[in-house]
Amino acid sequence: MTLISYPFSAILGWSASRYEAFSFCKRHYYYQYYPKFDAEFPVAKIQALKMLSTRALAVGSISHMGIEALLKRLEKSTAPIDSNRFAAHLTQLADSFIKTNTFDEAHYGNKPLPTAEELSEAAIEYLNLFLQSERYAWICALPESTRRAWMIEPGGFGETRINSLKAYCKVDFLLQHQGKTYIFDWKTGKADPEKHARQMLGYALFAHTNLGVGFDQIELIIHYLNGTETQVDIQAGDLPKFEAKVQADTQEMHSYCEQVDTNIPKPKEAFPMIEPQKLCGYCKFRELCDRG
Ligand code: SF4
């Protein structure tokens, strides 16, 4: 499968997570996306906070890496999984995650640091459910010929264009079978039907723009790793509505740029903090706002 690659452009690109940060708190958004422009704190300090992980993020990340390993193995072999070896692999991933990441819990000293065993146990539980799922059995039963074109956790950020605007929509897994393009998103968190359905529409536009796939050939599947699955049907009017939202979101974010084309933000004062609230207690930048 050959993806379109776009020449570098500095202008900001819409993504669901970027706009979510923007809507949540403008100051959080500033620290997340414009740390090098801050005159108050060293960029290295902001970057270090930006990279803080949490127990939930770690379990999600290790589970995604576990599925990636399973699917990459399936590309070559459908031999049964050795569950002990697979569990050992997840433990190794958890161990390496602990060693290479700083946890919010450790930095702020608010909760005990998760251990590699706790993280791998949670990921093993998710992955066991995945291995027992009808979806995994369906993937295993696909003809070998489909496997040559699987897109498993593709590199990069899923750059695309939505109505000519730069956007990022990175799929977890995409495959083509019997004239259909199946797009999967693996989720470890709670179901949020509206938000997740919107995210899947972004993936549909990505497949349409970057792979030339017709919308009527796209199947969008959210697979929750607690064992449930939801199919998102594209209804008439969904895509124009989504495109209009991306356009409005982008314009709103552009209005916080001093220079739109080069993505230079306005001064930090233009990005206000929210009123002190419980959510600040979960924000990785809280020490910069003196809300630790
Ligand atoms: S601590 Fe609160 S005000 Fe400060 S960046 Fe985070 S969410 Fe915004």
Image (cartoon, grey):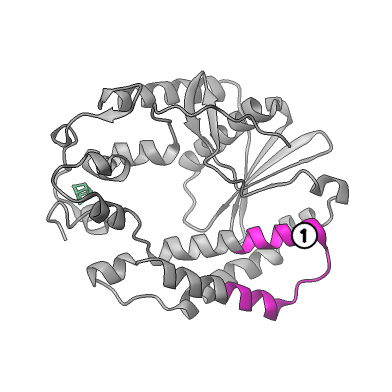
* Residue 25 in view in this figure: no
Where in the figure is residue 86, as x and y percent of width and height? 67, 74
Q: Give the main secondary structure of the magenta stretch.
A: helix
Q: Under tag 1, what secondary structure?
A: helix
| Residue 171 vertical placement versus 217 (above, below) | below
In this rendering, position of residue 114 left or right of residue 4: left
Residue at image coords 24%, 56% = 45
Q: Between 94 and 24, which is closer to the camera in this rendering?
A: 94
Q: Where is mark 1, residue-wise? A: 74
Q: Quadrant of the C terminus?
A: bottom left
Is 124 displayed left or right of 254 in the figure? right
Establish if 6 lies above or below 133. above
Left or right of 8? Residue 76 is: right
Q: Residues within 10 Å of mark 1 (few under 14, many from 20)?
A: some
Asked whether, in this view, residue 148 is left or right of residue 99, the answer is right
Locate residue 231: give its quadrant. top right
Tell me the amino acid under the disc marked 1.
Leu
Q: At which x and y percent is residue 16?
A: 44, 38
Instruction: Tell me the residue at 74%/46% (across/down).
Output: 150
What stretch of residues is rendered in magenta?
A: 66-90
Residue toward you, 184 or 53 = 53
Percent across and percent down for residue 156 are: 54, 43
Task: Name above or below for residue 73 compared with residue 13.
Answer: below
Occupied quadrant, residue 234: top right
Number of numbered callouts drawn: 1
Q: Is residue 139 magenta-colored?
A: no
The percent position of residue 131, horizontal first and vertical second, equals 70, 66
* Front residue of 53 and 142: 53
What residue is at 52 percent from the left and 41 percent from the top? 157
Q: Is residue 71 magenta?
A: yes
